[in-house]
C-alpha cells in the first residue's frame, strides 16, 4: 500500500497547488466581472478556496507530509484560459458568460481531483481524510451549481445585448 499512499500524498500536493493558484486568480476574475452577483460569487468562492487550502494543509500535516513541492499544471492551464477570458474584448454579460465558462472548467477539474483523492483515502482506510475531502467536493459541486444558475441569467442577458447591438447596427446602416 505504500505506493498508493505516495500517490494519495501526490494528489493532495497537486490539489494544494491548484487551490493556491486559484486563490491568486479569483480576485482577478471578480474584478473583471460586470455583474455584481458574479463578482460576489467569485469573492465567496475565494473565501471558500482559502478554507480548502487550510484543509489540505491539515490532512498533509496529519500524514506528516508537506503539501508543497508540486505544481499543478492542469490548473495552470485552466487559469491561463481564464486570463484569456479576462483579456478578451467582450463587454458586459458576454464577458461574464466567458468568465463563468472558465470558472466552470476549473470547478469540473476540482470535482474530478477531489473525487480521486477521496477514493484513494477510502481505499487507504483514511476515513477522516475521506470525509474532509468529501466536504470540499460537496462545496465544489455547490459552486458549480451556483455558476450554472448564474449562467442561465447571464447568457440570456448576453443574448439580449447581442440582439440590441444587431438592431443598432441595422439602424445605422439604413
Image (cartoon, grey):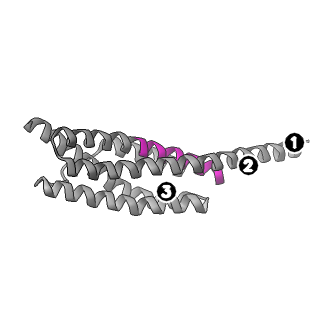
Residue of label 1? 173
Left or right: 135 as drawn, with respect to 36: left
- Give neighbour class at mark 3: few <14, some 14-19, many 20+ (Cα, 10 Å): many
94 magenta-colored? yes
> Whole-percent x and y of residue 150?
59, 51
Residue of label 3? 29
Instruction: Name which residue lies at 68% across and 47% down.
Output: 158
Residue span colored magenta: 89-108
Secondary structure of the residue carrying tag 1 is: helix
153 magenta-colored? no
Q: Are marks 1 and 2 in contact (CB under 8 Å)?
A: no
Above or below, 60 against 98 in this view is below
Mark 1 → mark 2, Cα distance in angstroms: 19 Å
> Whole-percent x and y of residue 17?
28, 51
Quarter holding the C terminus? top right
> Whole-percent x and y of residue 139?
40, 52
Q: Are marks 1 and 3 in contact (CB under 8 Å)?
A: no
Residue of label 2? 161
Considering only order in the chain, which callout, 3 or 1, is on the residue closer to the N terminus? 3
Secondary structure of the residue carrying tag 3 is: helix
Amino acid at each position: 500500500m505504500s505506493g498508493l499512499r505516495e500517490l494519495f500524498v501526490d494528489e493532495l500536493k497537486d490539489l494544494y497547488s491548484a487551490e493556491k493558484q486559484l486563490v491568486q486568480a479569483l480576485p482577478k476574475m471578480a474584478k473583471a466581472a460586470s455583474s455584481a452577483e458574479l463578482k460576489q460569487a467569485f469573492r465567496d468562492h475565494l473565501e471558500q478556496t482559502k478554507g480548502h487550502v487550510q484543509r489540505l494543509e491539515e490532512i498533509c500535516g496529519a500524514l506528516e507530509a508537506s503539501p508543497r513541492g508540486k505544481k499543478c499544471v492542469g490548473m495552470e492551464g485552466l487559469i491561463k484560459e481564464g486570463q484569456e477570458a479576462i483579456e478578451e474584448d467582450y463587454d458586459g454579460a458576454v464577458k461574464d458568460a466567458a468568465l463563468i465558462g472558465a470558472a466552470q472548467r476549473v470547478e469540473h477539474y476540482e470535482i474530478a481531483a477531489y473525487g480521486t483523492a477521496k477514493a484513494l483515502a477510502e481505499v487507504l482506510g483514511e476515513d477522516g481524510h475521506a470525509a474532509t475531502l468529501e466536504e470540499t467536493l460537496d462545496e465544489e459541486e455547490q459552486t458549480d451549481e451556483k455558476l450554472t444558475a448564474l449562467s442561465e441569467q447571464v447568457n440570456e442577458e448576453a443574448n439580449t445585448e447581442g440582439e440590441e447591438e444587431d438592431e443598432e447596427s441595422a439602424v445605422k446602416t439604413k
